[in-house]
Every structure is written in C-alpha cells, then in structure tokens.
Amino acid sequence: MKRFIRIISALIAALMLISVFACEPARPVPVTDTAAASETVKQTEAQTEPETETPETVTDKVTETEKITEPATTEKLTAAPDTEPPTEPPTEAPTTEPPTEPPTEPPTTEPPTDPPTEAPTEPPTEPPTTEEPPIDYRTTDSKYFTFTELDDGTYEIAAKDIRKMPYTVVLPSTYNGIPVTRVATNGFAYCTPIKNLIIPENYVILRNYCFFHCTNLKYVELTDGLNTLEYGVFGGCTKLPEIILPAGISSLYPLIFKECTALKSVKFDDPDGWIAGVDKIARSVLSNPTSAAKALKNEYLERSLKKETAAAIKNIKMKTINDGINGNVLVLYCETEEYATVTVTDLVTGKVLVKEKALGPYFYGMVLLPAGQTKLVSIKAQADGKPVSKTLIRRLQHTADVGNGAFIGKNSHVYLNYYDAFYWGGVAVSQEHMNNVRGYLKNRLQAVRDLTGKNTKIIMVICTNPATIYHSLQYPREQGGRGDYFLSTPSTQFAEFMKDDEDIYVLDLREILSQHTDRLLFMQADSHWTQIAAYYAYYLAIQKIKIDFPALPTYDLDRDFNVTHNTSGGDLLNFMGMSGMGARALNASVSPKRDDMKVGPDAPTAYIMGDSYYWAMSNYYDYMFSEVYLNEPESNPPLYDYHLNNLAERKPDYLLYVWTERNIGGDLGIMLQMNEIN
C-alpha cells in the first residue's frame, strides 16, 4: 500500500512537471536540487514508459532533463532586431525621426562580389508570390533639401543633411513655385537612410555622383524628362537590384553603376541606337535587362554611352505677334530633326502647351501667353522611330516689338492673316451675276479672236488658299485658332458655273490640291504656293489644251521631275518680324529629269498674265507652249497688268490668267474693266 502511494505521488509530481513545461516552454523549471529532480523524473518515467525500457535509456533521458533545467539568465527574451531593411518598399514614411547618425557598421553578410557567370536569357515572367506594398508618392517635405538657383531660372537640389532623410524620398518638382530640374553634384552622396527614390518628370540631369554610396537604396523610379546621367550617379549603391532607364535618356556617363554589386537588371525602355564612342552597341545586349546590367557593370563601366541619332534642338527664337484672332500670342521657333515632334511643357503645372511636328527641320508653335506673364518650359523633340532629344529649359515671355499679318496652325504651318485671303466663303453669287460676267468675257474674247484670226481661248487658273486646303491643320476656336474655312466661294461657284464652257476654262484647284495634302503645296512661311502645287495647275490646264492639241504629252510629277525641298525665307516672316531674327522656312522646287521635255514648234502659244502666283507656274510653261507672250518688259513682266498688246502680231492660241483666290475679286474686276485691246 505504501508502495502504491509512493507511485501515485510520483505520478502526480510528473504530471505537474509536464504541465509547467507545457505552459512556459521558455522558462526553466524552478528546481534547485538537481539530484531530486532526476529522481523525480526517473520515477515518473518508470510509470509512463514501457516495462522493457533499459536503465541506460533512462539515464540518457535524465541527462537531457539536466540540459533543460540549466539556470537561465535574468534578461527578458525579445524578438531579435531585423538588421536588413524590408524586402519591399513600405507604404508610408516612418512616424519616428530617422536615425541621426549613419550606420557605423556594414551589414554582417557581404554582398556578392561577382555577377552570375551566366545571365538568364529571359527576365522572370512570374511576379513575386508576396504582394508588394505600394510606395507613398507624396512629395517629401522641402525641409530636407537645399536649393540653388541656376542660370536658366530653375533650381538644383541637394540633401540638407545626409544623416536625416526619410527612407522614401520623392523629390519635389518645384521650389517656391519654380521648377527643380536637376540634382546637384554629390547632392545625396553617402545618404544611407534612403531606400526608395522617385524623381519626377521635370528633372533633366542627374549630376556627378549625386547618389553615390547610398548603400541602402533598393528602389529607383526615373521619368521620361531625364536625358543625362553623369559620372557615378548610382555608384556604390550596393543594394540596388534593378532599375529602368526611360526612353528620354540619351546620355550615360561612365561609372554610373560602379560597385552596384546587387544590380542584376537594367531595363532600357529604348534599347536602340546606343553607341560607346564610335562603337555601336548591339540591340540584343541592351534589350535584355540582365545582359544590359552586366554590360554596364563590366565592358561599358568606364565608357560613355550616347544615343547615336538623338534629335537636337537649336536656334530657339520667340516673337510676339498679333494674329488677328487672340490678339498677342507668342510664336516659338526652333530647328530640329526633320519632321520631329516638338513638345513644350509648362514646368510648373506639367501641362503640355504645344505638341506639334516640325515642317522639315523648322518648327513654329503658338503659345497663348497672357500679357505680362512668363512661363518656364521644357522643350524636347523626337523624330519617328528615333530617341528623344536632350531637354532644354527656356523662359517664355513676350517681346517688346509685335509682328502681325500671320497666324500659326498645327504642324508648323503658318498662314496669312488676311480675312479676304480665304474668306470670300459664305457669299452666294447669283446666277444673274455669273451670267453677266460670262457674257462680258464672251464679248471680250470675241474681240480678241477678231484680232488674232484664231479660235483663241481663255484659261483661268485659280489657286485657292492654304488654310482651306489644310483646314484640318487649323486650330479650332476653342484652342485659339480661327477654325473657319469655306469649301464654297465665289470662285468655286463661278468655276462650277463655267465647267461646260468650251471657250473659257475656269480651273478651280481646290479639289485636286485637297487630294495631295501630303505634299508641300504652299511655302511654310509665305503666302504663295510651291512648284509642287503649280504642277497640279499645269496638269489641269494641259488636259484642256489637249482638246485642241492632242499630241501634247502630259508629264508625271514623280516620273518626269525631281522634287526637292529647300530653305527659304517668306513674306510671312517679314510680316511677323522674324526674318531678321534668323528664322527660316521650308520651300519646294521641281526640275525636269530630262532635257528633251520641252514642247516643239507645233505646240500652242499663249499670252500670260496674273498675280504673284504666276512665278511658280512659270516653271511649266515650256511643257505647255511653244512660245509665251508677256506684257512689257517681257524679261520682268509686271503683275496685275491685263492689257493685251500686239494681239494681231502675236496671235496667241490661249490667254492664260494665273491667280490666287484671295485676289480673284480684284483680278477679275481689273480684267473686266480693261479698255485696251490692240
């Protein structure tokens, strides 16, 4: 019985011991007599283990118990501090102050000293299994930075104290309302608190070593506004694993990623057209983020990389004009790569003010700038399929002298600002009036025929205005443009009225020119047409002439002529006051491919008159007429002279009048009022 009581007591003691261990696994058993504890354990195990257990096994278990019951330290146990930063950027900046001192010791684990010996051929296709928390994109308080004003009126930024910086830094776009456009040399060097860095759109340049040895930097977000990364910008950022280089970047200096031992991925948004010195870099190298990272850390580490074909912007001019629509507007002119898209952006608001194509290499843009105001803007250009130019910063402001006589359309088209130039539209001409005009012309033509002894005919070439042909390139009224154009004018109505007449051919060029707006039909900054547009007048005229002279050839513009674009000035530049500023414009010329294209002596003759549009069409007279008669002096025919001299001697087959629509009222009026035919 006593033995039974001892067994029950030992069992109760064992159960109590087990309960203590189960409830407080981290605390030692409060026992001071090790031998007594061992005896208790032996007795307990004797009741719970199988009877076949050997004494040796019990002894081993006593030893394990002795290990468990070693006295513990008196310090309270807590979770070990995390010596490594979180693997993903946090969503908010910490509420506590950042450390006042930089870390005194490097991480206990060394970063890899060499990149992988063989890069994977494709970047990972699956996202991480853990969800990445979003970054807080609120702009970091300006109290952490210093700002230095630059010559262009913008600011450069640097850290005020590299030891006191939030771990997520979103650089400010402006300071006191003025854009910040670059990071200063050494501006954030050795700034170890930074882990996440966001650089906004209007930053243009990261200067030398500006983020050098930011050893905890793990995430960088750049934007398209950047175009240059100078020496060692991210050198020594040992925890930076990847980075994306936007398409706007066109220049990378040496040592940018020196000692970036964790960098495994550099993604080029535009991997084409890069060169190192004179050596082209294969697209296959930079299109794969892994191989691009290896290349920039190894063979191209100490070499400058540049875009081979990046457009340039030069010869920037500004001029205030009264465009007759908005009052004073600012015309922005520059030269760039042919047909590049030029973007002008307000650096303060981020609003795109102008985004239009250059016409050839010459860009004209309109900015609605209120009087007395200025704007800091970025200007950049990009040709189709080519990289973006370097971004230039300029302050837009009105000029003291004001030009006039023109307004600006889309894609660098400049139009004559003369209402009657193309706004005879909206006027309906009565049938009675057109009958009277036709009757008068018939009478005068008969008088001509009496003198020539021939069946002389009249050809009237009427060139419409460019703002009608290119009406889709006018800004609508809500965007500051005139926006109105007319497909029906007195000249088109009269041409339609006369279309079946067999003696007087009125050729309205509106339809045929509208079919070829992909060509340069009008000089860019001049109120006149080009020789390309004049070709289409030749084409319509030769069809009429071939009714009586069917053997005449019809030459094709592309097959039989050379078309070249060239630089010229223009009367609109004179009106705006920009010709003396060095602004230029695009023109086009046409020349024959062969010397045998002139017509022979059997071709008809013509007496030619007209306004200033005469000159472009004179390029084709040799392919229409065997002889051309002009008013005296014939070497320099006076325009707007419609007297017909020496008709009996000259005997022309045609009277050819070449007019622009803006002058049709005056020209036709003069012709109808002429009182001398001899």
Image: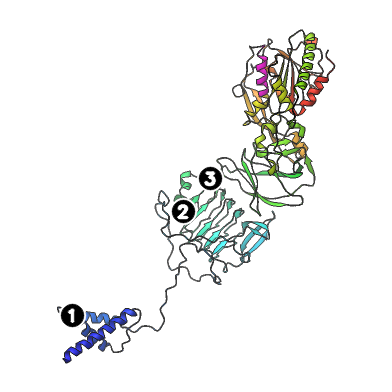
| Residue count near mark 3 (Cα–Cα under 10 Å), binned few <14, some 14–19, many ≥20 | some
The quadrant the N terminus occupies is: bottom left
**Residue 522, position in %: x, y?**
69, 31
Left or right of 516: which side holds 9?
Answer: left
Give the mark nearest the N terminus, 1 or 2.
Answer: 1
Question: Which residue position is annotated with label 3?
Answer: 275
> Mark 1–mark 2 contact, CB under 8 Å?
no
Q: Residue at x 75, y 48 (%)?
A: 398
Q: Residue furthest left?
A: 52
Q: Nearer the viewer, mark 1 or mark 3?
A: 1
Q: Position of residue 515 (x, y in %)?
A: 62, 28
Where on the picture, by quarter, is residue 144? bottom right
Vertical comparison of 516 with 478: above or below: above
What residue is shown with label 1?
Answer: 56
Task: Work out whether residue 30 or residue 429 is closer to the camera in this orientation and state it.
Answer: 429
- Alpha carbons under labels 2 and 3: distance apart: 20 Å
Q: With respect to residue 83, does 419 lie above or below?
A: above
Q: Which residue is mark 2?
A: 265
Magenta stretch: dominant SS? helix
Q: Secondary structure at mark 2?
A: strand
Q: Nearer the viewer, residue 426 or 409?
A: 426
- Which residue corresponds to the image point at 41% horizontal and 81% vertical from the top-left? 76
